[in-house]
């Protein structure tokens, strides 16, 4: 058993040391990309290339305005309507996972700034699939979704490229460069209807309890002060890291909800369920493998599996009440208690997929620690 065994899922984050929390925060940021990688190829296979591009756009436009405003409130910089406020949100957005994407920022005035990527992990992955794939992400998808994120701060905000891929020459750096500005007198950008449906969910309004540690213990307790162009999670206090990590999880799960809603609107609930289950299984398996390494979990018994699941990004602490009972070296009981997730009243979230038997996502997480693990339901 390890140091994490005594912590339940709602307080596990609060028990981690500062360096581990910062590392875990980067894993939670990356999870937003894993969620996409595990779902959009299946949308392509089951519904076609045009549907994949459309769903990708609606997914981010549906979720990002909601989670951007949540992060602004959580980290103490809500109420601003300038470029600095937009950039603070981007620095805490799963779309710009730290280190996987190297994003730099410059503010010229209250109403104008720019950001650029010396290295973009998403681009490096896509370039091997050809120019059409690159244009789909860097043109068709990013144009509306960048604006949708910015207008969560100011409906007059615009994000426009200075240059972007396909790269000419092929080794061009930075990979892309964008201007962000407020177009005074312009037409306000309006949210798409899907955003309203995402905002109406219990997850979107779920309020976490205050972390069980006092502010002022070293590092920034919020992001209300000066903008830091080279912001890193290590600048935050343990208390602020707990708050940020919980919000990163909400961001990914709002993306899940937006994707499943968009698939259901385009096709039907059966398609949303099918793709959602594949998404959960694929993303959770990779996340469990990475999380095991990040936490330094070396064993492969039931206790080790519990250590990984207790902090796994599949579970938003408090919103979903998960209990983990280690019954012996070879047996772990996973309990789902009464919680907000079970009151959503619709099937557009992963926890509505727990009736699958055997449960592929839970099993995939456990098998990332021990390939011999099996997951079976003991109650309906």
Image (cartoon, rainbow, N blue to C red):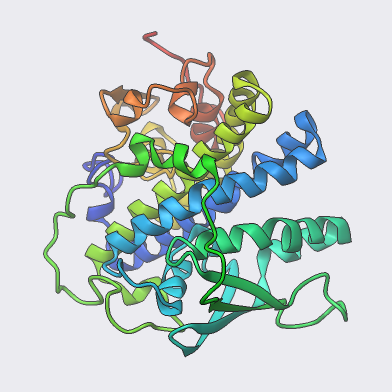
| Looking at the image, residue 196 lies above or below residue 103 | above
Seen as rendered, the residue at the extreme bottom is 108
Residue 218: quadrant of the picture: bottom left
Where is residue 29? Give x, y as percent. 48, 58
Residue 275 as seen in the image, left or right of residue 10: right
Q: Tell me the residue at 86%/56% (across/down).
A: 132
Q: Which of 280 and 85 is in front in this view?
A: 85
The N terminus, quarter of image: top left
User: Which residue lies most toward the front here?
Assistant: 185
Side of 197 where 337 appears, left or right: left
Residue 42 place in picture, x, y as percent = 72, 34
Residue furthest to the top: 380
275 is higher (above) or lower (below) than 2: above
How many marks are shown on the rendered structure? Answer: 0
| Residue drawn at 66 percent across, 74 percent down | 160
Residue 334 visible in the current orientation: no
Q: Where is residue 110 in the image (x, y as percent from the top left)?
A: 43, 85
- Look at the image and tell me in which quarter the C terminus lies: top left
* Towards the viewer: 147 or 378: 147
Quarter where residue 211 is shown: bottom left
368 relative position to 305: left or right: right
Say which residue appears at 30% left-offset and 66% top-offset: 78
On the question of residue 83 being in view, the answer is: yes
Identified at 82% across, 63% down, the residue is 127
What is the x, y in percent for residue 241?
A: 30, 63
Q: In this view, does 129 lie above or below 263?
A: below
């Amino acid at each position: 058993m390890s140091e994490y065994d005594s912590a339940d899922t709602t307080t596990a984050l609060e028990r981690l040391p500062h360096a581990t929390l910062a590392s875990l925060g980067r894993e939670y940021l990356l999870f937003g990309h894993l969620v996409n990688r595990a779902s959009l190829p299946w949308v392509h296979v089951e519904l076609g290339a045009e549907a994949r591009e459309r769903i990708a756009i609606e997914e981010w436009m549906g979720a990002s305005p909601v989670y951007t405003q949540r992060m602004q409130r959580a980290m103490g910089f809500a109420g601003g309507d300038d470029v600095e406020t937009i950039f603070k949100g981007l620095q805490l957005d799963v779309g710009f996972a730290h280190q996987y994407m190297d994003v730099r920022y410059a503010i010229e005035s209250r109403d104008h700034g720019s950001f650029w990527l010396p290295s973009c992990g998403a681009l490096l992955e896509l370039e091997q699939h050809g120019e059409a794939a690159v244009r789909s992400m860097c043109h068709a998808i990013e144009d509306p979704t960048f604006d949708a994120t910015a207008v969560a701060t100011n409906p007059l905000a615009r994000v426009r490229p200075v240059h972007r891929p396909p790269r000419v020459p092929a080794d061009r750096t930075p990979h892309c460069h964008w201007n962000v500005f407020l177009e005074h007198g312009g037409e306000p950008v309006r949210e798409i209807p899907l955003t309203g449906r995402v905002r109406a969910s219990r997850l979107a309004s779920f309020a976490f309890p205050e972390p069980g540690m006092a502010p002022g213990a070293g590092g920034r307790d919020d992001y209300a002060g000066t903008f830091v162009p080279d912001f890193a999670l290590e600048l935050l206090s343990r208390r602020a890291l707990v708050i940020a990590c919980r919000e990163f999880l909400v961001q990914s799960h709002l993306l899940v909800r937006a994707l499943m809603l968009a698939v259901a609107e385009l096709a039907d609930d059966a398609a949303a369920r099918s793709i959602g289950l594949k998404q959960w299984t694929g993303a959770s398996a990779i996340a469990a493998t990475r999380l095991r390494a990040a936490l330094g979990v070396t064993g492969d018994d039931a206790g080790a599996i519990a250590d990984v699941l207790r902090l796994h990004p599949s579970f938003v602490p408090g919103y979903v009440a998960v209990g983990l009972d280690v019954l012996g070296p070879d047996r772990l009981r996973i309990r789902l208690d009464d919680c907000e997730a079970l009151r959503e009243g619709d099937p557009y979230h992963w926890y509505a997929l727990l009736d699958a038997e055997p449960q592929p996502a839970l099993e995939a997480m456990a098998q990332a620690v021990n390939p011999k693990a099996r997951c079976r339901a003991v109650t309906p």
